[in-house]
Amino acid sequence: MSKDHVILWFRQDLRLSDNAALTAALETGATVIPLFILDDESFGARRMGGAQRWWLHQSLTALAAQLEALGSRLILRQGVAGPILKALVEESGAKAVYWNRCYDPESIARDKAIKAGLTEAGLTASSHAGLLLMEPWELKTKGGGFFKVFSPLWRALQTSYKHKAPLPAPKSLPSLPSLKSDDLEAWALCPNNPNWAEGFGAVWEPGSEGAQTRLRQFLNEALSVYKTQRDRPDIEATSRLSPHLRFGEISPRQIWQAVQEELDTGKASQAGADKFLAEIAWREFSYHLLFHIDRLADRPLRPEFADFPWQDDPDGYEAWCKGQTGYPIVDAGMRQLWQTGWMHNRVRMIVGSFLIKDLLIPWQEGERWFWDCLVDADPANNTASWQWVAGCGADAAPYFRVFNPVLQGERYDPQGAFVRAWVPELARLPDRFIHKPWEAPDLLLREAGVTLGETYPKPLVDHGEARKRALAAFGDIKKDRAA
Ligand code: FAD
């Protein structure tokens, strides 16, 4: 086989435009071999959750079609990345492997070992930036350390980020020599029997074209109201770009550019744009923490939380997972998650607070359920956000902030439209009881077809009591620490 081959290893960057590794690989003039490895086996690798696997299947299908339209092909292989790359190098005679960097500790360790192996064998290993606006080590506090608080990181990012226009996608690609590839169907990434992802296809269009459509739609319809409406789960006021960002079907640089263009042409409000870019920066912050802090996924950043008196409550956990807690806003969110693979940010905070503070179930269990159910389950955002909700993370919500699920529902879903959409058995309740059906008079419940304890659960806990219990428990760990 010809010597002029290089491998482009796709990972969290399933796109052809603004893909620095792809551009650099093409600049060598060699034939680029596009490769994706399903690696559940490398040491420490965290197996993708079920919903992400569904997304991955669709996203790889879209990427393969784009590559074929340009004259190339996507090679699929499954197993431990190091040996797979080695085998493909031998089969193809490739002289180099290009990739865009990942920042979780397991990927870093794996990539370092692969780089060392390739270099030792006289090959080139070329890694590039593509997942973030800035590399986690480029942003530093005045003292030279990393940021543990969001606002100064955001200020630093605004000053130091030097925006460059996103890289274009190639117009054509050289055809590939004959190389074997797995059959994507044989990876069985999509569930069947039961097909719990049945509803996902109606909600999502995985792939970079879907990402661009979603971005355009958001910029046209919601960016201007983003600042004021983004907390309302009953209104489509957020971008829903999270799974596209998770799989790198769109880059934050492309988003930044698109938002600036909206501002330059006067189509976007400064307030909406600023708030939206700040949320993109929260993603940068999560990755900053993931890179700089060891074991973000399972160890509380505040050490006193390691001794927290968590409850062993399998029934409470199951009710939470199934959206059967008896608190309508919590149940609506958990069912939205199950049926679409996504949940609104405000509701993620409410259900997270409920699990941790009302039920005293460890945040790691919530994190694991989200990891399995979210199409956007992200190694940085999911873990950092769960630590934030628990109060044990960097720049976290204070432990005494215990969300009241009734007041949160009344404030952010004032007519109950979100609850009615996901908890249809309550749909006929009037607005004033939709977030607290247990306070509705019996006659009214009967008229609405609701029998508490039968058609819809009674509240799993009394929120007032649960709040006191949580504050006492959180207070105790503080005292222990002080002593
Ligand atoms: P938009 O409001 O349109 O925001 C645009 C983008 O900014 C998002 O796509 C996301 O990439 C980023 N972003 C927004 N809010 C946050 C945030 N608070 N922290 C970090 N980045 C943010 N987000 C994930 O992408 N993956 C996760 O696994 C994840 N798990 C979470 C778990 C909990 C308990 C909580 C409270 C939040 C979690 N988030 C996670 C953050 C946030 O809820 C989602 O990013 C957001 O709801 C995605 O919807 P969107 O794309 O419409 O967001």
Image (cartoon, rainbow, N blue to C red):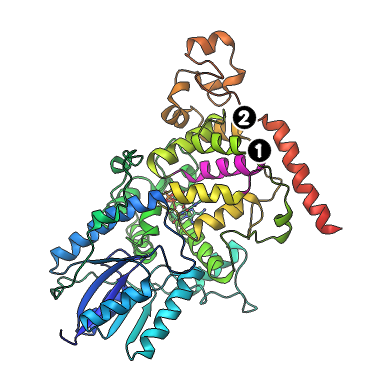
Chain part drawn in magenta: 343-362
Q: Residues within 10 Å of mark 1 (few under 14, many from 20)?
A: many
Residue at point 13%, 63% (across, down): 69
Is there any visible trace of residue 404 in the rendered image? yes
| Amino acid type assigned to the residue bearing label 2 in the image | Leu
Tag of residue 460: 2
Q: Which residue type carries mark 1?
A: Asp
For the point 52% across and 44% down, the residue is: 348
- Please tell me whether residue 327 belongs to the stretch shown in magenta: no
Residue farthest toward the top in the current orientation of the protein? 443
SS class of the residue under badge 1? helix
**Residue shown at the point (64%, 50%) measured from the top left:** 390
The answer to whether the residues at label 1 and label 2 have Cβ atoms under 8 Å apart is yes
Instruction: Please name the residue that numbered disc 1 is placed on.
Output: 358
Please state, as top left, top right, bottom left or bottom right, where the C terminus lies in the image: bottom right
- Front-lying residue, 329 or 269: 329
Mark 1 or 2, nearer chain start: 1
Is 237 placed above or below 170 here?
above
